Structures are given as structure tokens and as C-alpha cells.
Image (spheres, grey):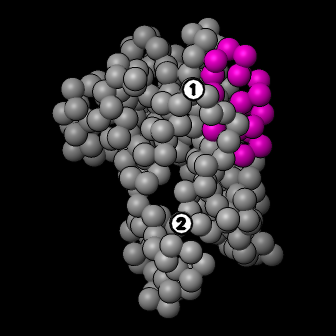
Amino acid sequence: MLKGKTVIVTGAAKGIGREIALQFAKKGCNIVLNYRSNVSDDLIQEIEGCGVQCMPVQGDVSDFAFAGQMVKEAKKALGTIDVLVNNAGITRDMLLMRMSEEDFDAVINTNLKGTFNMIRHVSNVMLKQRSGAIINMSSVVGVTGNAGQANYAASKAGVIGLTKSTAKELAARGVTCNAIAPGFVETDMTGALSEEVQKAILDTIPLKKYGHVDDIARAAVFLAENSYITGQVLNVDGGMVM
């Protein structure tokens, strides 16, 4: 079903984004691999090893003009844009009373405005095709809030509102838009936490374990394959917000 399709994945150099790109490549999709700082040659080779094309594009999705140029170049090089995964995101955690304006703006600009920028440019392509799937990365804290993450929670809650509005606007042309809200996912960052902090986190998760990047990636593939799901937020969180 996805074989031969073109997928843009933002923030795809590592972690969840990397795994999403690989999972779509294994499904036979050509990958537009967006990253901000650097990307390993190994990842590009692994994607191309799936028998698909990989188009690495360095740049910051919070830049409206860059987002438009990336979409334009991807369409020209690969013919169509069938799936957009808005995964690029940053954190600048700090208690609200100590949070700087710069740290608030930086997180909103990448996580929320960057998602808007990509949707704004990709939607033109998908509306003309009368098909497409947009998948936005939200977070469990966008649903529940979290102390010390006012900027991040606000950006991810905004992504949910943007997702639902986009779904309503584009549905008539056969374009779907959904969000994934991951909980705690096993990464280098969670691995560096103290045993005490890790236990406190696990106590909030009914399944008593962290998620893995492939749990999120498989959810993204599922939403891309299903053309009758739109405007939804899929919580992949071990039961945290049920």
C-alpha cells in the first residue's frame, strides 16, 4: 500500500525520527530525510539498502522559507509527496517562573510553528493530488501538562489543535491529518536518569515500562496506511493518560 510513496520526515537524524524513516523505508517508501545539524552516512545507507531513494535535506523547519523550498525540491525530485511526518522538536525545560522568553519562543517556533510551516507547504501538493497523510508528533504532556515544561506542553497542545483544524480543512480532498502523543520512550536521555527518577516515572505508567522508538514508528506507519482515520490523537504511552 505504501510502496513507491514519498515520505518527508522532519527531525529524522536520530531517535524517534530516525526509526520512523527506517520503518517507512522498509515499507518501500522513498524518504526525504530532514535534519538540522548532522546525519550519519550509516542511516542514509540503511535507508537506501531497502531499495528506495533517500534525499537528505539539512535545515530548520521553523524557517518558513526553508520549509517551502524543501517541499518544492522533494516534489521536483520524487514526483509526489504522499506522507508528511512532523517529528522535529526541541525542549528547553525550566520552571515557569524562571523560564526565559527566548526559551519559550524557541520551543514554540520549532515544535508548533515548524509543524505549521510544513503543513502549509505540503497541503498545496496533497490537495492537488487529492490524497495524502499528515502525521504530527504531539506528546502526552500536550494532553496532561507537566511542571517544568510549560513551553513544551504548550507547543504540543498547540499541535493537537492544529491537527484537528487541518483534518477538518483537508478532509474533503482525501487528505488525513492525525497526531501521535508518545509517553516516555526509551532513549539516551531517559537512560541517563537516576534510578530514583526512573522509578518515579515508571510508577506513573500502568504498563510499568518505557516505550521504544519502534512503538512510535509503527503507529506512524499505521496512520499513513489508514485513509479513514483523521483528526485523531493516538496516545502511545503505556496507559499514562487513560
Residue 159 lies in what quarter of the image? Answer: top right
Q: Residue at x 60, y 78 (%)?
A: 204
Q: Is residue 202 above or below residue 118?
A: below
Q: Main secondary structure of the magenta part?
A: helix
Q: Position of residue 26 (x, y in %)?
A: 29, 35
Is residue 116 at all visible to an observer of this figure? no
Q: Residue at x 50, y 27 (%)?
A: 83
Question: Which quadrant of the rendered structure holds the C terminus?
Answer: bottom right
Q: Which residues are magenta?
A: 160-178
Residue at the disc numbered 2: 238
Q: Residue furthest bottom?
A: 196
Residue 222 within the magenta-colored segment of the rendering: no
Q: Is residue 63 above or below residue 238?
A: above
- How many numbered callouts? 2
Q: Position of residue 196 (x, y in %)?
A: 50, 91
Give whichever of 37, 12 is nearer the camera: 12
Q: Is residue 131 above or below residue 194?
A: above
Q: Residue furthest right?
A: 97
Q: Secondary structure at mark 2?
A: loop
Give the residue type that dot 1 points to.
Ser
Residue at the disc numbered 1: 227
Give the residue type that dot 2 points to.
Gly
Instruction: Give the spatial CA distance, label 1 vs label 2.
Output: 25 Å
Question: Which quadrant of the rendered structure holds the N terminus?
Answer: top left
